[in-house]
Image (spheres, grey):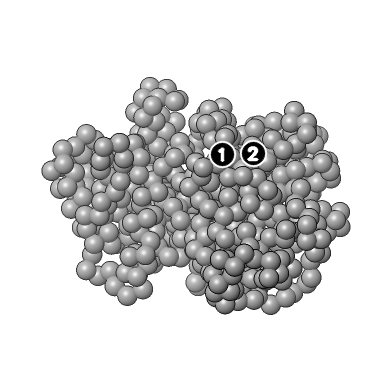
Amino acid sequence: MKITAIRPLLLVPFLLFIAHCTTAPVLKQLPVAQPSHRPKRMMVLVFDQLRPDLIDRFDMKNFKRLRSEGISYPNAMVGHLSSVTVVSHPVITTGLFPKHLPWQDEFFLDTRGELGKPNQFYSSLDLEPVQYQKLLEPTKAVSLLSRFSSLEKNSSENHSYTLGQKQYAVMGLAAPLTGSVITLGGKLKNPLGWRPPFGIRVPSFFTEPFLGRFYLDCNPSYGSDTSLYPLDGNRFAPGQDPLHAGGDQWVSDGILHIFRNDPEWKSVFATFGSIDKILHILAEHQNETREGWAIENHLTLKETLKRADLALGDILNFLEEKKWLEETVILVTADHGGQANESFHGLTQPGLGTNYLFYANAKNRKNIELPKSLAPILKNNWVEAISHDSGLRIWTKNLTHIQLSKLATEVSALPGVAEVYTLHKTENRYHYVRTFRSPSLKGKELQWANENNADLVETMATQGAAQIVALLFDKHGYGFLGDHGGAQEWVQRIPLIVHSPNIAPQFHGTELPNKARLVDVNPILSKIIGLSSPTELDGNSQGIDVMLSE
């Protein structure tokens, strides 16, 4: 699009916008389609816990290559709470804030009794596929996947795929689960400890033959047994068997397998879980690991990032070879960032896994392990459940305003607490009110809090949400050594890169200054592929209109 083609009223803000954009270095040239070429296919690739600074620090060439031939948002952020995998993935696809979704955290209160009796807690990490389907069915009208699939001439055919190693991440990303959903199932008894392909409408070319490419040996721990979150065999590690490579290559090979078996594919949404697993265990966000088992088995962050970059490169190269890159919009992002909890207040016994993440008597999982540092708020028996990571979300029993205020004061005295918010209802609207801010919140952290924290907590304000939310200082946490979940800047920072054949060539390599959020992915891609965005969406297309070829 030429500047002279823009309406006069838009010219001045557009020029100001361009003045604030910078141009990334051009690496390997990707094919450019004709300006009028609107994409016919769509890909969303989510690299779990990939912080944007890691792309440049570790020279991730394929990410940089995609960025240089697309557009990117260097100020992108998660934009909601809780900033966890099981929440962010459905936010990406639906374009809805967590308060408009079935769950807002690692577990949730089923106030309406969708899954059983009303007001029972459920772990959102451990639902059955049919339960995910039931809870996510209402998102069909807004889901990017379902709306894009409706454009197919023969809607009875399924050319939509979602895949990844984590079942709960894949289920959320696939909302409302109308296409093929491919992940890894429970461990087999024969051969012992292997995981098969599993999901919803899993194609036979994944499941057959038995013990074929996409079955993984999930027995080895690679020496990680003493960590808080041990490896699950080759689910997140590549392993030694090239015929059954695990980790992020399992995901990229799965995508290539779809390409080969269904040349008519329309959408592929994929989530890559290895970076997240390694960062949770090793907390290498700033410093290199000293863990011998990780170094010996080539499972450090540096090597994990290299494999993720190769996985992206394999996908791009295949698309180039088939000339599909010229008809595909690709969006690359992360579900959250992360930080090293240098001030760690959580559980320390090894091997608890996701039991570290919440304290609740949930219907489908009972977690009663709780860090001793949180014991002071249990003395009055007012607390029903706690989600604890780089933030605290606390569900209470039916308390009076005086009791809730007293408990909030006790929460403010917990280690690492910077701010406390309590949930209130005004007429028919739920909202959070800040009741405490630490005088130690200063400088850059204070600036970030002033600009973001009130908006972040508001994204999960709904019936059944936590009555008390405590936001923590940077580098403080109660979950893993490497952690997320809260509002800290590096927990919220994510990459957001878009490559599409109908982004005008003069904008390739442009960095947009917009503070884009995950809730904006749906409307951004809707605009690119020519879908009108439903009015219910909480996100917006972030000014991408002016960058598209007419």
Q: Residue at x 60, y 76 (%)?
A: 22
Q: Residue at x 55, y 59 (%)?
A: 542
Task: Give residue 133's quadrant in the image.
Answer: top right
Residue 147: mark? 2
In contact (CB < 8 Å): disc 2 and disc 1: yes
Residue underneath mark 1 = 142
* Local SS, label 2: helix
Residue name at image x 56 percent, y 39 percent: 142
As shown in the figure, which amino acid type bears the numbered disc 2? Answer: Arg
* Left or right of residue 211, residue 467 in this image: left
Quarter of the image for the N terminus: give it.
bottom right
Q: Nearer the viewer, residue 359 or 435?
A: 435
Could you tell me residue 445's position as x and y percent? 35, 69
The picture places residue 268, in percent across and down from the top left corner, at 70, 46
- Quadrant assignment for the C terminus: bottom right
User: CA–CA distance between discs 2 and 1?
Assistant: 7 Å
Residue 367 visible in the displayed image? yes
Q: Is residue 125 left or right of residue 155?
A: left
Decide if residue 69 is in sight here: no
**Local secondary structure at mark 1:** loop
Report the side of 160 relative to 319 (left or right): left
- Mark 2 and mark 1 lie on one chain; the one further toward the N terminus is 1
Number of other residues with Cα within 10 Å of mark 1, as a class: few under 14, some 14 to 19, many 20 or more: many
